[in-house]
Image (cartoon, rainbow, N blue to C red):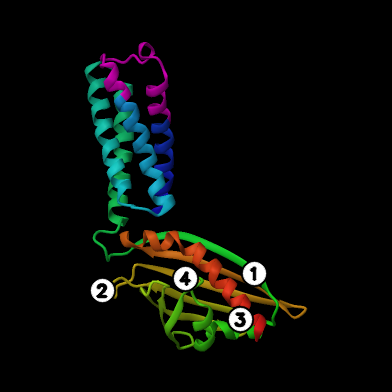
Amino acid sequence: MTYALWIVQGLLALVFLFAGGMKLVLPLEQLTGPVPLPGLFVRFLGVAEVLGALGLILPGLLGIRPGLTPLAAVGLVIIMIGATVVTLVGGVIPAALISLVVGLLAAVVAYGRWRLAPHGGSSQAPVERELVFTRVFDAPSRRVFKAWIDPQQVARWWGPHGFTNPVCELDARPGGAIRIDMRGPDGVVYPMTGAYQAIVEPERLVFTSAALDGAGKPLFEVVNTVTFAEQGGKTTQTSKARVVKTTSGAARYLAGMEAGWTQSLERLAALVAKA
């Protein structure tokens, strides 16, 4: 259903960007319809259609306030109801049918995205976003792999520069639990949990991770896949972090995820180089 919604959203966004753009750039005398409308109202509709089109796409792409997408779709449904009525009054039946179909598609998007969007701070909604990092370490693969599953070593490199990990508990086996409390330079603690899904030493590691809110509930969930390939005493590590669930409170954490991983891997490189 998610992929079908994205296809419909993309098509609707193109339609409304074009229609709204025309209402904004064309001279008013060229914007004739079956029922005359005030010029300012036509411009207002153009702005509303462009904003609605952006609302169909940007929240999902950026992962910020996904609840805006169903609101944007509802706004476009209202516009299409008005367009259907106006064209029916003007006797243009084909145009009324087109407006009705577009409105129904927007209603489908509104309902579908409302069902998928997080309601309240704790419910999680499906989402797909993936970050990929490739780095070459000047160390053999067994040393690098060990630095991922040894809690004493993980505590030394996990998190951005300036962060410490007063709690680092790893049960390095399939199904084993992960618990890490990161403490920022300002003293704020960021707890996270997870679980190992696969461990193939020293080639592959798969585990989940989830940052927790103040009530101990997951803000989002990430599936992490790390592979290690050794050649000439050096290890090429490829890390994939795929966000599979998120909530409305996760935006600021997800926005800093790429920088956080980049700095963590810099700390890991320094650690394994010294070993």
Report whether 264 appears left or right of 71: right
Q: Inspect this view and state whether residue 150 appears.
A: no
Looking at the rendered structure, the secondary structure element under dot 3 is: helix
Amino acid identity at mark 2? Ala
Evaluate whether residue 62 shows in this view.
yes
> How many discs appear?
4
Q: Mark 3 to mark 1: distance in Å? A: 14 Å
The picture quadrant where one finds residue 178 is bottom left
Q: Upstream in the sequence, badge 3 or badge 1?
A: 1
Label 4 sits on residue: 223
**Front position in the image: 47 or 91:** 47
Asked whether residue 36 is drawn in magenta, I would say yes
Which SS class for mark 2?
Answer: loop
Q: Earlier in the sequence, mark 4 or mark 3?
A: 4
Q: Which mark is residue 215?
A: 2
Return the x and y of residue 216 as percentages of the image width and height: 29, 75
Q: Pointer 1 and pointer 2: residues touching (CB < 8 Å)?
A: no
Which residue position holds label 1?
135
Residue type at the position of mark 3: Leu
- Crowding around mark 1 (Cα neighbors within 10 Å: few <14, some 14 to 19, many 20+) is some
> Magenta stretch?
18-43
Question: How packed is label 4: few (under 14 Cα within 10 Å), some, or many (20 or more)?
Answer: many
The numbered mark at residue 271 is 3
